[in-house]
Amino acid sequence: MNAAPAGTAVHVDGLTRSFGSRRVLDHIELRVEQGEFFSLLGPSGCGKTTALRIIAGLEHADEGRVHIDGVDVTRAPAHRRPTNLVFQQGALFPHMDVARNVAFGLSTERTDRKETARRVAEALDIVGMSAFAGRTPGTLSGGQRQRVAVARALVKRPRVLLLDEPLSALDLSLQLRMRRELRAVQRRTDTTFVCVTHNQAEAMEMSDRIAVMAHGRIEQVGTAEELYRSPASRFVAEFIGENNLFETAGTRDDPEGGTRRVLTTDAGLRLPLPEQFSVTPDTVVAVRPEAFRITAPDTPGIAGHATVRSAGFLGTRVRVVLETPDGREVIVDAAATGPAPTVGESVGLDVDASDVVLLPPAAAPGGAR
């Protein structure tokens, strides 16, 4: 097992967990830095919640170690770890007012009354709920209850705050506001946050870094921009935002002349290919919808021709669905600065080499739930 380097708040090393014959976590390795907002992102059943619960001490691993602030806590019970957990529903006591809910964890540690009152006031101030100290949970909105749950977790001053789908029970408008508020709380307290979510936009907006999980394995760790612009696998390319994915049909010199090489796809497109790129027959090609440009069909050097099947106005952009001569669908997000393409119109399609991403073939799925 590897020791955690200095500055690492959470180090998960070789974590494996199975339920019966189903392997839920497959030797995952993670390092979360101190003061970082880190998210575990993936679809339902990918193993992310199991990983969080093992970090919290609520479940055990079959193999691997968990270090927090350099201390091996693999065998330590939950109450002996410098962590606290915020659940999806908040789990507040309905018969207690807000202040007593927040103070509950301190009362179990027999913290004196004066210190408890000071820390409860501080925690409520951090989450903007000081004015609601005397209210009961039933009189609060969903967002307010979740802020109280965060205050209750923060009042014990954990080294690491763990959040399990903390916003999924809220409606969209509350989710959007709570994303900003959670991020502001994390920055104000400089507490390490580890958040589990299936919501890509939520993870991308709040997180310093994100670990994308699938089938009990970590596909890629990086910033939101790194995951979006440079996905390491087909799964990440499909899961983070939208992508047009094509199979490689071969490479050749540009038929329009010049020195560039192009790769041909199963959609009949000719995509520019930088010289240093290595292409194999099973290479997958990804192009984001906003990377494609719609041009006149007779423009020199274009990637291909297509027919407009639909065009929908989305505010700052127009979502255009095209069909190539090979019958493949291509999604293009065009700037809404001029007249939108009309249905049935024949157009050209072009893209820069820097916006063409080559991916390895998809790995065989594992058995995580």
Image (cartoon, rainbow, N blue to C red):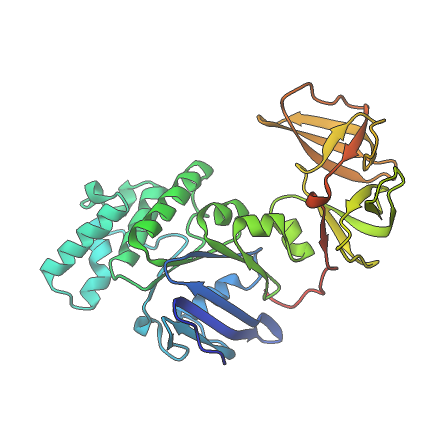
Image position of 57 (left or right of 62): left
Image position of 177 (left or right of 96): right
Question: In the orientation shown, which residue stands out farthest toward the front?
Answer: 259
| 360 vs 98: above or below | below
Tell me which residue sits at (76%, 35%) in the image.
350
Tell me which residue sits at (32%, 68%) in the image.
82
Tell me which residue sits at (49%, 62%) in the image.
49
| 245 vs 17: above or below | above
Quadrant into which the C terminus falls: bottom right
From where the camera sits, is residue 82 visible?
A: yes
Q: Pinpoint residue 191: horizontal percent, then vertical percent.
A: 33, 58
Q: Pinpoint residue 323: horizontal percent, then vertical percent.
A: 81, 34
Tell me which residue sits at (14%, 55%) in the image.
117
Image position of 46 (left or right of 133): right
Q: Pinpoint residue 302: horizontal percent, then vertical percent.
A: 81, 34
From where the camera sits, is residue 212 visible?
A: no
Q: Is 301 or 335 nearer to us in this picture?
A: 301
| 135 vs 81: above or below | above
Q: Is 42 or 169 nearer to us in this picture?
A: 42
Image position of 274 (left or right of 19): right
| 243 vs 118: above or below | above
Q: Pinpoint residue 241: horizontal percent, then vertical percent.
A: 61, 45
